[in-house]
Image (cartoon, helix red, strand yellow):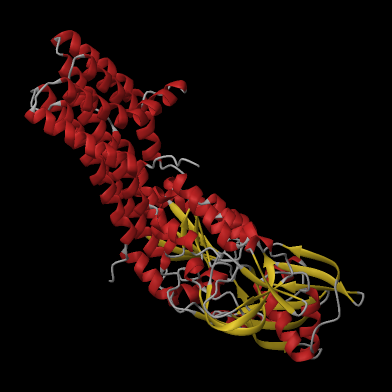
């Protein structure tokens, strides 16, 4: 027969019975042997976990709260204050239990995420459907998902369609429709329809698993305030022991000295910062915003400048070919050559050209030779033994190719916010491909909300030409824009903004803007679901592409810092009042412990409020 170890709750209930009997005996029988025995048993039962923790901490040369309580209880027993010893240990135990239950609520968001983890997967093997655990699914397996089931892998839909609840990944409250060739994530739920998915990321490589890991790491990451409080408590606790000893030597009052030990426990102060940070980060994760740690959470609310990348951030990043003009060759040929040259490029403009070429002539068969990417300008390549240049006017000027005859035409399109991609051989311009990208529908509103929450300066950094940048900047009401920037130019501009205005955040897609994200005070990657690079490099990750989340997370950061300060001030106030009460001899040992535990609980309950934070409508 296996005897189960009693739970903390069971021990607490036994302690409740013992302390009640001790109190009744104390009131009706006074100081009898049986009364003393019940008090000592209560103190021993409730005090053992505290004594153990104090000893473990001492092995690592740490004198913490448990050591203070242990000294006070042992001292109370030695001087015959058995009721005080029993009451202090019981109250400390009760407080510890309530703290652990309450603090679980601050981690409710991570529990919600854990509950959304898939527990099974249905894989097609030949003509059979086999249920396996998600970690047993292999890349390339065909996973079948039916209505109401959780998707267990990241992958591409091969067959079927349905409405999918993606709130676990992006925070989007409404289900989205997904069909063949579209991407789906692990941890999301299909509400209607059915899917057959080709597994591309499985187990710990899925976006859901990475989010879970990031949130757990972030909640354990300490804010600067928290680090300071922990350093403070390392010196504070030994100092209190010395102070109590000094008080005893001066007053010869051992009860007074022991009471000082108990009321000086920095429990509420030490816990004041981490509970707020944990609750704030959890709230963000539930809404599809991952803030990587307490220090980032503290910084976010103090941002003065926000710099946006253009393509993929303020615009949809899915530009399409709006027009083609050829000089001396056919338009179809301009498109064919350009698409061949862009074969190895991942740039959004390249994808637009390749897609258009596919629509006009079918999948391309020509591949370039000696292809060379010229950062910030375009590329050069050889096709059919001819050297071509594809890019912006800077590239043409570098190659001494004249563009004066088409200059006005280029300017006209750029004023509309369109991008012009020029194709040339070593002698002349062969064609112009006009590419247009739409501004995001929520971009203007997001900029307005950021201004309303006090962001001093909002700018756009882009490698695009001045006229296109100006058109978009005017449309969105930005304070400033910087155009025709190379990646290193963006880093330089960010440094200038930091010097002029203060703390600066850079918002990008996390892939093309890695240097700028890294060099800003805070890097914010948006639309990062499925992008490992974005999740790894940014300080703040918006899993969806909703720009509105920026003002939300800044408001959340400020509320978290405000909540943390409220906790700190409250803890200091309570400690000061208790200290004054001890010095005027109006606070005794068990009452001091009761107030101390109550203050800890209030601090945690205040932090729990952050789990329900919502952005105020303006």
From the viewer's side, name the closer residue of 342 and 53: 53
Q: Quadrant of residue 442?
A: bottom left
Q: Quadrant of residue 579?
A: top left
In which quadrant of the rendered image does the C terminus lie?
A: bottom left
- Left of 444 or right of it: where is 205? right
- Where is residue 547 drawn, in percent x and y? 45, 69
- Where is residue 479 drawn, in percent x and y? 41, 66
- Where is residue 419 drawn, in percent x and y? 62, 78
> Residue sitting at 54 percent across and 53 percent down?
213
Residue farthest toward the front in the current orientation of the protein: 1
From the viewer's side, name the closer residue of 31 and 341: 31
- Residue 444 visible in the shown view: yes
From the viewer's side, name the closer residue of 304 and 266: 266
From the viewer's side, name the closer residue of 222 and 245: 245
Q: Quadrant of residue 448?
A: bottom left
- Where is residue 245 drawn, in percent x and y? 24, 13
Identify whether 617 is placed above or below 522. Answer: below
> Residue sitting at 73 percent across and 80 percent down?
354
- Left of 477 or right of it: where is 378? right
> Residue sitting at 33 percent across and 52 percent down?
560
- Left of 266 or right of it: where is 216? right
- Residue 454 visible in the shown view: no
> Total label count?
0
Identify whether 595 is placed above or below 501. Answer: above
- Left of 365 or right of it: where is 437? left
């Amino acid at each position: 027969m296996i005897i189960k170890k009693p739970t903390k709750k069971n021990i607490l209930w036994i302690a409740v019975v013992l302390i009640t009997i001790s109190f009744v005996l104390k009131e009706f029988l006074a100081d009898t042997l049986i009364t003393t025995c019940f008090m000592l048993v209560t103190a021993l039962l409730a005090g053992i976990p505290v004594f153990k923790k104090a000893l473990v901490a001492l092995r690592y040369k740490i004198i913490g709260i448990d050591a203070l309580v242990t000294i006070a209880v042992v001292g109370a027993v030695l001087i015959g204050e058995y009721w005080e010893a029993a009451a202090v240990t019981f109250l400390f135990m009760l407080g510890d239990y309530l703290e652990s239950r309450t603090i679980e609520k601050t981690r409710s968001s991570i529990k919600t995420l854990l509950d959304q983890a898939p527990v099974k997967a249905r894989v097609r093997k030949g003509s059979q459907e086999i249920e396996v655990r998600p970690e047993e699914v292999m890349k390339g397996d065909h996973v079948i998902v039916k209505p109401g089931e959780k998707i267990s892998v990241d992958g591409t839909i091969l067959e079927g369609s349905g409405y999918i609840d993606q709130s676990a990944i992006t925070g989007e409250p409404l289900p989205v429709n997904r069909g063949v060739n579209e991407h789906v994530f692990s941890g999301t739920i299909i509400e209607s329809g059915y899917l057959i998915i080709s597994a591309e990321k499985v187990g710990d490589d899925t976006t859901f698993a990475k989010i879970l890991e990031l949130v757990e790491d972030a909640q354990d990451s300490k804010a600067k305030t928290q680090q300071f409080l922990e350093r403070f408590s390392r010196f504070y606790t030994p100092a209190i022991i010395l102070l109590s000893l000094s008080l005893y030597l001066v007053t010869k009052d051992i009860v007074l000295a022991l009471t000082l030990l108990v009321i000086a426990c920095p429990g509420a102060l030490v816990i004041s910062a981490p509970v707020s940070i944990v609750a704030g980060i959890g709230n963000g994760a539930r809404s599809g915003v991952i803030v990587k740690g307490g220090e980032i959470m503290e910084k976010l609310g103090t941002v003065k400048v926000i710099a946006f990348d253009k393509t993929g951030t303020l615009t949809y990043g899915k530009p399409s070919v709006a027009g083609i003009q050829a000089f001396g060759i056919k338009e179809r040929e301009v498109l064919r050559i350009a698409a061949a040259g862009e074969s190895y490029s991942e740039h959004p403009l390249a994808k637009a050209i390749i897609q258009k070429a596919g629509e006009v002539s079918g999948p391309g068969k020509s591949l370039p030779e000696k292809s060379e990417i010229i950062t910030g300008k375009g590329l050069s390549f050889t096709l059919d033994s001819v050297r071509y240049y594809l890019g912006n006017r800077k590239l043409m000027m570098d190659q001494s190719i004249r563009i004066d005859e088409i200059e006005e035409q280029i300017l006209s399109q750029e004023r509309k916010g369109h991008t012009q991609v020029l194709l040339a051989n070593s002698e002349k311009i062969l064609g112009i491909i006009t590419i247009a990208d739409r501004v995001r529908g929520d971009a203007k509103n997001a900029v307005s909300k950021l201004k309303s929450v006090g962001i001093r300066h909002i700018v756009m950094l882009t490698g695009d030409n001045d006229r296109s940048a100006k058109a978009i900047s005017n449309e969105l009401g930005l304070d400033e824009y910087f155009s025709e920037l190379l990646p290193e130019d963006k880093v330089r501009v960010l440094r200038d903004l930091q010097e002029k205005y203060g703390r600066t955040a850079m918002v990008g897609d996390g892939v093309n803007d890695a240097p700028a994200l890294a060099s800003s005070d805070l890097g914010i990657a948006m639309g990062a679901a499925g992008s490992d690079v974005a999740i790894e490099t940014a300080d703040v990750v918006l899993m969806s592409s909703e720009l509105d989340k920026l003002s939300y997370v800044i408001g959340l950061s400020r509320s978290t810092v405000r909540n943390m300060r409220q906790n700190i001030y409250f803890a200091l106030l309570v400690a000061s009042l208790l200290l004054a009460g001890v010095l005027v001899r109006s606070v005794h040992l068990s009452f001091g412990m009761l107030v101390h535990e109550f203050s800890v609980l209030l601090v945690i309950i205040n932090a729990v409020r952050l789990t329900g934070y919502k952005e105020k409508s303006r």
